[in-house]
Image (cartoon, rainbow, N blue to C red):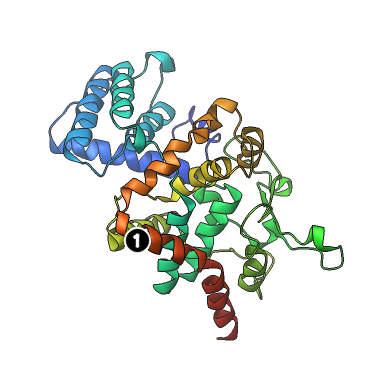
Amino acid sequence: MPLGRRLRTQKVQPTTLLRYSLRIKNAESWFTKHQIKHDTHEDLDQALCLFFDHLADRCPREEPTVGAYTVYGYQLLRCNIPTHLFLPNAKQQLAGWKHCMPGGMRLGVAEEIADECCVTALENGAVEFALAAQLELDTYFRPSEVLTLRSRQITPPKVDSGTSYQKWVATLAPSEEKGRTKTGLTDACVVVADKTRPWLTDALALWLEGVADNDAVFPSLTLNTYERGWQQLMTQKKYPASLITPHVLRHTAASNDLFHGRRNLAAVQKRGFWQSRKSVARYGKEAHVLKSWHKVPAHLHASIRSRAKQLPQLMLAALRARVKA
């Protein structure tokens, strides 16, 4: 990282920084392939406009989030002028892309659809993948936050403290590690399974059995393998590629808690550590949860709901079998 830019990169997580870098690399590979100049700020602005046009028109699987990561990446890593003067036309192009494809900005799906996908993952033998997804759905953690959890960040229930306290607690950015969350917090704690998924209490106990204090909770998963797992599931089930991605799960959790009346906006904002009420307001639009049912074949709806109900039993059975093995 060049001198003069290192400190400003500290405000984002390493996984986010990597994602920014990959988006920049993909954009510049496209510029090179098509012999498009991008050396000056003005050339880069025009080049990104052409790139976003290409993605929107020729690559239906790509979403506006791709453009957002590209712009944010360039702004963080390459900008040396006031940000309001940087890439003005590309930002307008991105805004238009979002307007044309609002569903591409990670809206949640009905939780039964996500749960039934986890059942399919269990049938595929992907127990670790399915449990990570369910923990993300329960805690509202970002994918990178779930996948980088260490066992010491998950506090077990106190056995002799009464039934009210039989809950696990997951902590992001423990203060002793001198790290911070994406929004700058330390010791950001969430009670696991406080409203739904009571079976997660037993599931975590089974999964963490024998795990040392500083071991990774999900050692076999990286963000790339997790993303690839969801892509493969969408292909296997013949769903739209963007229906569920790792980041969609966080939004699914918030949307469904609001839709089913389990939490209000203030409680959702607190659980997800969103800094502004505006950030969570979109999750109160119940229509988005309902619309997700129209993205899967109608003849599968009853089966999806039925299979989703089997998830707790199947997950615990898979985890018990793992312990015995």
- The residue furthest bottom is 325
> Taking 300 as reference, is 275 above or below it?
above
Residue 107 visible from this viewpoint: no
| Quadrant into which the N terminus falls | top left
- State the image coordinates of residue 178 (x, y, percent, origin top left): 68, 44
The number of callouts visible is 1
Residue 123 lies left or right of residue 179; in this view the side is: left
**Which residue is the site of mark 1?**
233
Residue 216 versus residue 67: which sits nearer the camera?
Answer: 67
- The residue furthest left is 34
Q: Secondary structure at mark 1?
A: helix
- State the image coordinates of residue 258 (x, y, percent, origin top left): 57, 40
> Taking 271 as reference, is 89 above or below it?
above
| Quadrant into which the C terminus falls | bottom right
- Using the rendered view, name the quadrant where residue 298 is placed: bottom left
- Which residue corresponds to the image point at 66% horizontal and 56% vertical from the top-left? 193
> Taking 280 as reference, is 233 above or below it?
below
- Which residue corresponds to the image point at 31% horizontal and 19% vertical from the top-left? 92
Q: Amino acid at mark 1?
A: Leu
- Using the rendered view, name the quadrant where residue 78 is placed: top left
Dot 1, how many residues are within 10 Å of its Cα: few (below 14), some (14-19), or many (20+)?
many
Residue 10 lies left or right of residue 41; in this view the side is: right
- Which residue corresponds to the image point at 41% horizontal and 73% vertical from the top-left? 123
- State the image coordinates of residue 149 (x, y, percent, origin top left): 60, 56
- State the image coordinates of residue 238 (x, y, percent, origin top left): 27, 58
Residue 299 visible from this viewpoint: yes
Residue 183 lies left or right of residue 233; in this view the side is: right
Residue 34 versus residue 312: which sits nearer the camera?
Answer: 312
